[in-house]
Amino acid sequence: MRHARRILLPLLALFLSACVTVQDGPTQNEKASDINVQLGIGYYRQGNLEQANAKLLKALRQNPKNSQAHFAYAVLLTRFTEFDKAEEHFRKAVELDPQNSEALNNFGAFLCNQGRVDEAEKMFLQAVKNPVYKTPELAYTNAATCLLQKSQGREKTAQEYLIKALAYRSTYAPALIELAQLMFDQGRYDLAQLYLKRLHLATKPTARSLWLAVQTELALDHVEKARELGKLLEESFPDSPQTRSWKKLELDG
C-alpha cells in the first residue's frame, strides 16, 4: 500500500503560537484589532465559524494593516472554500509582514494544495529565512512533502529539505517518516530502517510507520522481524488500512 503524503498544516497551533506584532504606541483601534483577532481564532477553534467571521472582519475594519488578521481570515476563507479571496488575504498578510513565517508556511501549503508547487516552495523557503521563526523544521518538511506529492524528479531537493528539518530538530517525526519513505522508495532499505529506528525511539509508532517498517524488514530479508512488527501493527491498529494490507500479505505469503 503506497502512502499518500500530506502537507502539514496545523493552523490552530500556529494561531495560538503566532505573536501579534505590536508597534510602539499602538492606537486604540490597533489594540482592539489584535484582541478581535484572538477572539476570532478562539471561535474558529471552537467550530463557531459565524462568530469567527464576525470577529475577524471587525479586526480588519479596525486595522486593515494587521497581518495576523489577514492571515487568520485567509484560513477561515479556506475553510469556506473561498479560495480566491483566501489567496488575497494570504498575500496581504505576507506583504504587510514579510517576517510572518506562520503565514508564509500556511500560504505555501495553500498554494501546494492548489498544485502551484514553485510558488509554494518559494513561500516555505521565505518562512525559514526568518531567524526567529520557532518551527523551521515544519516549513522545510512541508516544502519536501509538497515536492514529493506534486512534482516529479525533485526527490533530491526534497531529501535536502528533510535533512535540513532534522538539523533543526533531530527527533522531528514528520521529517523522519518522510525520509524513511523516500529511502524505501529508492530501494535504500538500510537507510529506511535507520530512519524508522530513530523515529520509533523518538515517538510512538503509527500504523504508517509500522507498515513501512514491515515492508523494509521484508526487503532486507528479515522475515522474523517483519512478522514481529506485523503482529504489533495488528495489535495496535486492528482496523487500519495498513493492518488489512498486512493480513493480505500474510494470506498471500
Image (tube, rainbow, N blue to C red):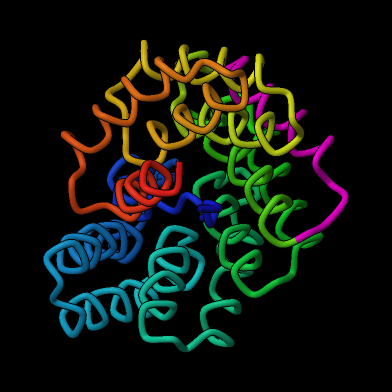
**Image position, residue 212 (x, y; %):** 48, 34
**Image position, residue 32 (x, y; %):** 25, 63
Magenta part of the chain: 151-168
- Residue at position x 56%, y 44% from top? 101
Residue closest to the eye, 102 or 35: 102
Q: Quadrant of residue 69?
A: bottom left
**Image position, residue 253 (x, y; %):** 45, 41
Residue 54, compared with residue 168, is above or below; it is below
- Residue at position x 37%, y 17% from top? 200
- Tag count in the figure? 0
- Residue at position x 46%, y 13% from top? 197
Whether 112 is among the magenta residues is no
Residue 41, compared with residue 193, is above or below; it is below
Residue furthest right in the image:
153
**Image position, residue 48 (x, y; %):** 13, 76
Q: Quadrant of residue 25?
A: top left
Q: Is residue 40 left or right of residue 100?
A: left
Q: Main secondary structure of the magenta part?
A: helix
- Residue at position x 44%, y 48% from top? 252
Residue closest to the eye, 211 or 51: 211
Q: Is residue 27 left or right of residue 50?
A: right
Residue 152, compared with residue 188, is above or below; it is below
Q: Quadrant of residue 55?
A: bottom left
